[in-house]
Image (cartoon, grey):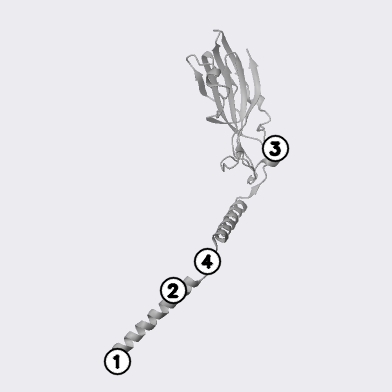
Amino acid sequence: MGDMQGAAMKWTRLSAWLSLGLAACAQPTAAPSLQKEIAVTETERDEAAIRAEMNYRPVKWPLKFKRHNFGARCYDTLYCSIWYGGMESGDERPSVPSSTYGIDYLDNWNGGMSFDNFPPPAEVTWRSRDGLTHKTDIDVAAIFRDELMLHNVPREEISDVPDGRLRTNPSILLEVNDRTIRIYMRARIPTKRLQIPGNPYSDVRYDLILVKTYNY
């Protein structure tokens, strides 16, 4: 009698488990399109929460900088030395003409050394292709005395940033090219729209701006 009662209890438990399993299987599942919509909504909600927490705001205008990166290059010289902020750049040996690299020879050029605004003037000494020796000081502080970032992005196209502060250092670039010195600025500016449609990493512009030209 005891064995029959035990078997009955086991059967009751088994029936309950089966019922629960069938009930779970019978629950309706969201359609794939609905699931995708839910996922997108959750992602947007997460992004909104992050932006709120980090206090994203329109950039403070105008864009200014207190630190900058510096870089120097020499082309078509017999010797070239640039001292800036206690560091030297240049070529002790003859450098090739910029035409060797094509019209885009300055693409992707950025400053590698970072400084507070501003070290003393850059000291430039070089021999041009004709063999003449030149020496000059380039007063970077005077050129950029207003500490404004130079760029080509309209204010309304710049992305919101945490606390409205654009935490990026522009690059100030010095090119010695035979008997010419050119000063450029390149600043990384985040944009609301993708610069290359379909490329999620293209929400930025990094234009090279020619600021000053000296001929010797």
**Residue topped by disc 2:** 21
- Kindly state the secondary structure of the residue where label 4 is placed: loop
Crowd class of label 1 (few under 14; some 14 to 19; many from 20; radius 10 Å): few
Residue drawn at 58 percent across, 11 percent down: 134
Q: Amino acid at mark 1?
A: Met
Q: Quick check: 51 left or right of 8? A: right
Q: Is residue 61 at least partly visible in the picture?
A: no
- Residue 167 in the image: state x and y as whole percent: 60, 40
Image-quadrant location for residue 135: top right
Alpha carbon distance from label 3 to label 2: 61 Å
Circle 3 residues within 10 Å: few <14, some 14–19, many ≥20: few
Q: Is residue 73 above or below residue 1?
A: above
Q: Is 155 or 197 nearer to us in this picture?
A: 197
When asked about the image quadrant of residue 130, the answer is top right
Dot 2: within a 10 Å radius of its alpha carbon, few (fewer than 14), some, or many (20 or more) residues? few
Rounded to the nearest angstrom, the CA distance separating label 4 from label 3 is 47 Å
- Which numbered disc flags the more N-terminal residue, 2 or 4? 2
Specify the amino acid type for callout 4.
Thr
Label 2 and label 1: CA atoms lie apart by 31 Å
Is 105 positioned to the left or the right of 60 in the image? Answer: left
Instruction: Name the mark on residue 154.
Output: 3
C-beta proximity under 8 Å, tags 4 and 3: no
Dot 1 corresponds to which residue? Answer: 1
Amino acid marked by disc 2: Gly
Q: Earlier in the sequence, mark 4 or mark 3?
A: 4
Q: Position of residue 183 (x, y in %)?
A: 62, 23
Ranked by sequence position, the earlier of labels 1 and 4 is: 1
Q: Position of residue 24 (x, y in %)?
A: 47, 72
Q: Nearer the viewer, residue 34 or 79?
A: 34
Give amino acid for label 3: Pro
Numbered circle sitting on residue 29: 4
